[in-house]
Image (tube, rainbow, N blue to C red):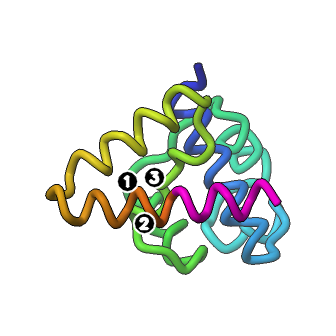
Amino acid sequence: MKTNKALLGERIRELRKIKGLTQEKFAELIGVEQKHVSRLELGKSFPPLERLETMAQVLDVPLKGIFDFIHLADKKTRAEGVEALLGQLDDEHQKIAVKIFISVVEALRQ
């Protein structure tokens, strides 16, 4: 099971690559050395809140978007996350969500 620090690092790497930024350029934009970005992306360090806020601005995501890494977790944790989301819905909305999920899974199998 991956640690939250490792998942956070993977998420930041994912967002950085989506923006087309190298580690060097990203480091420059957030005011740190490239080695700090590398350690963060490897899950070896955790930035202070102020730096996370700067990262979110540079990556053009809300701060909470940096922590949206359930899709990077292991299979069991992902399944638990989906179950928890479904549990937040009332019965009618849950039925709709399950239908949508089934349709997506079937489309991905093709």
Q: State the image coordinates of residue 86 (x, y, percent, origin top left).
A: 30, 50
Q: Residues within 10 Å of mark 3 (few under 14, many from 20)?
A: some
Instruction: Give the Cα distance between marks 3 and 1.
Output: 12 Å
Task: Pick the residue in front: 98 or 22.
Answer: 98
**Tag shown at residue 53:** 2
Side (left or right) of 60 relative to 62: right
Side (left or right) of 85 relative to 108: left
Q: Which residue is mark 3?
A: 67
Q: Examine the rendered structure and indicate whether residue 58 appears above or below residue 94.
A: below
CB atoms of marks 2 and 1 within 8 Å: yes
| N-terminal label among 3 and 1 | 1
Q: Which residue is mark 1?
A: 49
- The residue type indicated by label 3 comes to Phe
Instruction: Give the Cα distance between marks 2 and 1.
Output: 6 Å
- The residue type indicated by label 1 comes to Leu
Q: State the image coordinates of residue 99 (x, y, percent, origin top left).
A: 44, 62
Q: Residues within 10 Å of mark 1 (few under 14, many from 20)?
A: few
| N-terminal label among 3 and 2 | 2
Question: Looking at the image, which residue is at 54% across and 33% down?
Answer: 5
Q: How many marks?
A: 3
Side (left or right) of 76 relative to 72: left
**Quarter of image, res 110:** bottom right
Give the residues in magenta: 102-110
Kindly state the secondary structure of the residue where label 1 is placed.
helix
Kindly state the secondary structure of the residue where label 2 is placed.
helix
Question: Looking at the image, which residue is at 52% across and 38% down?
Answer: 78
Q: Residues within 10 Å of mark 2 (few under 14, many from 20)?
A: some
